[in-house]
Image: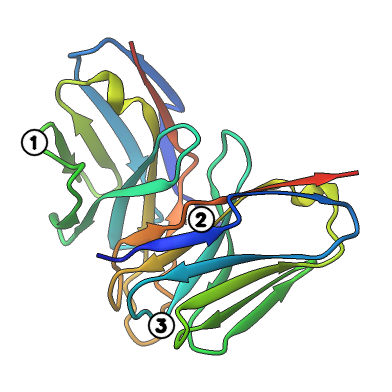
Amino acid sequence: EPEVTQTPSHQVTQMGQEVILRCVPISNHLYFYWYRQILGQKVEFLVSFYNNEISEKSEIFDDQFSVERPDGSNFTLKIRSTKLEDSAMYFCASSETVYWTSTYEQYFGPGTRLTVT
Amino acid sequence: ELKVEQNPLFLSMQEGKNYTIYCNYSTTSDRLYWYRQDPGKSLESLFVLLSNGAVKQEGRLMASLDTKARLSTLHITAAVHDLSATYFCAVPSNFGNEKLTFGTGTRLTIIP
């Protein structure tokens, strides 16, 4: 069964460093998302991406964040200068775009745990 | 702004008992999703509810959606230890492939 994959599973970085989190969405999906979950809290939307551009972003997704689809399979989230409060689990998700039959269900990857020290 | 509230936040129940988790949301939506999350793990899709009155059942879990009341319920029947997890409801903001707003989560602990 197709699944969303993410690398690395755990990333430790120092405050102020840049990190890139990688995701491979399900191959026939066209909508991609990043969410984050601070430990013990709910899941929060960061950004959605379609047709090579951001379709929506949250207030959390400030100028320190960027997303890219560098090739036909990867989808990346970059944090330019990490802060302590960026420590969280980051989930990538994808959904298919078939307007007349789709459930629009989002399939989530296993997550990357980012620890900023 | 869409708000999604779940209650209770924490639920400790004995094996064999029944209970219901509630998910209320603040703006119109015709779809709702339920996810399960084990500690340190990803979100596992449980139910996709696509219309008013939708009811889905899988094993000891049953989910329903009332779009007029903006309410979904997740009912647990004869709980077993394996159901211990955190359960989230999630509501899309608009029609189509839009962002999900998640509820606060219900941490369910089943006690033998």
At x 35%, y 48%, the residue is A44
Q: Are marks 2 and 1 on the same chain?
A: yes
Residue marked by disc 3: B30
Per the image, label 3 sits on a secondary structure element best described as loop
Residue B85: image location, x then y, percent: 67, 46
At x 16%, y 35%, the residue is A65
Left/right placement of residue B66 relative to residue B31 reads: right
- Subunit of label 1: A
At x 76%, y 52%, the residue is B83
Depth check: give the residue in front, B107 or A113.
B107
Question: Which one is closest to the eye, mark 2 or mark 1?
Answer: 1
Q: Are marks 3 and 2 on the same chain?
A: no
In terms of image quadrants, where is residue B22? Answer: bottom right
Q: Do the numbered discs 3 and 2 sit on residues whose CB atoms are within 8 Å?
A: no
Q: What residue type is labelled 1?
A: Asp
Residue marked by disc 1: A63
- Disc on res. A2: 2
- Subunit of label 3: B
Residue A9: image location, x then y, percent: 46, 28
Q: What residue type is labelled 3?
A: Asp
